């Protein structure tokens, strides 16, 4: 996360980035579970 913050010129808050990443994981988990189930049933 620190490298991304440096690339962005330190214009974003690390707290904000952490919240966004947390939400990505929350939203992506069901998608991954669905894809895994589809692969297993093929």
Image (tube, rainbow, N blue to C red):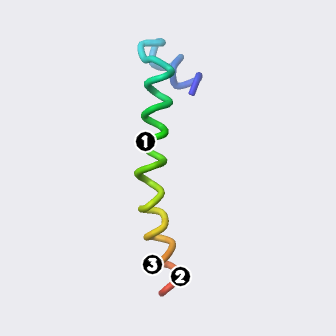
**SS at mark 1?**
helix
**SS at mark 2?**
helix
Nearer to me, 3 or 19:
19
**Where's residue 40, x and y in %?**
53, 82
Q: Residue at point 50% right, 30% down? A: 18
User: Which circle, 1 or 3, is nearer the viewer?
Assistant: 1
Residue linked to disc 1: 23
**Where's residue 39, x and y in %?**
50, 78
Q: Residue at point 56% right, 28% down? A: 1
Residue linked to disc 2: 40
Where residue 31 sits, quadrant-wise, is bottom left
**SS at mark 3?**
helix
How packed is label 1: few (under 14 Cα within 10 Å), some, or many (20 or more)?
few
- In the figure, is residue 2 to the left or right of 30? right
- Whether residues under marks 2 and 3 lie with C-beta atoms below 8 angstroms apart, the answer is yes
**Where's residue 9, x and y in %?**
46, 12
Residue linked to disc 3: 38
Instruction: Kindly identify which numbered label has been placed on residue 5.
Output: none
Rounded to the nearest whole Å, what is the CA distance between mark 2 and mark 3? 6 Å
- Whether residues under marks 2 and 1 lie with C-beta atoms below 8 angstroms apart, the answer is no
Q: Is residue 21 above or below residue 39?
A: above
Q: Residue at point 43% right, 44% down? A: 24
């Amino acid at each position: 996360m620190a490298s991304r913050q440096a690339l962005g010129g330190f214009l974003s808050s690390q707290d904000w980035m952490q919240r966004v990443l947390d939400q990505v994981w929350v939203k992506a988990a069901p998608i991954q579970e669905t894809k895994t189930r589809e692969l297993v049933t093929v």
